[in-house]
Image (cartoon, rainbow, N blue to C red):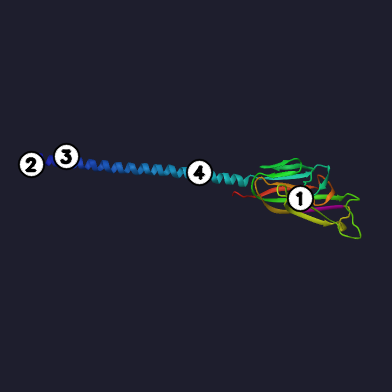
Amino acid sequence: MVEQRTWWKCLLINVWNQFLFIINLVILICIAKEVLRSKDDMQEIKHESALIKRKYQAQEEPVILMLSGNTQTSVGSGYQEAIRGWEINYMQGNITFFQDKYIKIEIAGFYYVSLQLIIWRSKGVIERKNNDTVILDIGVFDVKTLRRLLAASFDLRFCEDICTRNVQNILKLEKGDILGVNSMNLNIFIRMMRSKNHFSVYLVKNQSI
């Protein structure tokens, strides 16, 4: 009788130990899954954090280009040719200025674009006849497509030989766009004065944000 009880006791102990082993194994498996899930979550969190950081940095990085006249005299050659005579007054961020007349957009987005020019007429080329109105104009255009993005016109009756105009707006520009300043009129002399002639581009909102 004593031997039978001992056998049952050993059997119960063995069963209990196996039960505890299974329980511990299940717990270890659950812990391992949680660890793996946590690692995946951490990787996802790191990835999202990196994206947010890049977007934040892109949003915070200012893109500004301010050009002024370089004191030379430039001549308007029609809508297909950009007016020369610009120099960098201030530049920050990812944007390009080249050949003293072109601005290349490196980041797609919405830009505040502003232009101011001093213009006077070439005597004998543009003049009023029989009190007819002669309209002069300036503008900012897309060099690749020749499309006018900004434009301003003015009447010689109100400015005589010397005229000035300022035009500005917010434009949606793509990466790779090239901007220039032009005039539809030929033989328009533009005195590129540092204090009077300005061509500026400022990134208001990055398109990728």
Comparing labels 1 and 3, the label whose residue is closer to the camera: 1
- Amino acid bearing label 1: Leu
Q: How crowded is mark 4: few (under 14 residues within 10 Å), some or many (20 or more)?
A: few
Of the pair 68 and 121, the residue shown nearer to us: 121
Q: Nearer the viewer, mark 2 or mark 4?
A: 4
Tell me if label 1 and label 4 are in contact, CB under 8 Å.
Answer: no
Q: In this figure, which residue is indicated by the disc labeled 2?
A: 1
Q: Give yes or no for residue 118 being in the magenta stretch.
A: no
Q: Magenta-highlighted stretch: main secondary structure?
A: strand
What residue lies at 61% left-to-right and 45% top-to-bottom? 58
Residue under pointer 4? 47
Q: Is residue 170 left or right of residue 33?
A: right
The residue drawn where x is 72% and y is 44% is 103
SS state under label 1: strand
Mark 1: few/some/many CA within 10 Å (<14, 14-19, 20+): many
User: What residue did someone put label 3 on?
Assistant: 10
Mark 1 or mark 3: name the one nearer the start of the chain: 3
What span is colored magenta in the figure? 162-166
Looking at the image, the residue that sits furthest to the left is 1
Q: Earlier in the sequence, mark 4 or mark 3?
A: 3
Cα–Cα gap, marks 4 and 3: 55 Å
Question: Of the residues under marks 2 and 4, which one precedes in the sequence?
Answer: 2
Nearest to the eye among marks 4 and 3: give it: 4
Question: Can you tell which mark lies on residue 115?
Answer: 1
x, y (%) of residue 62?
66, 45
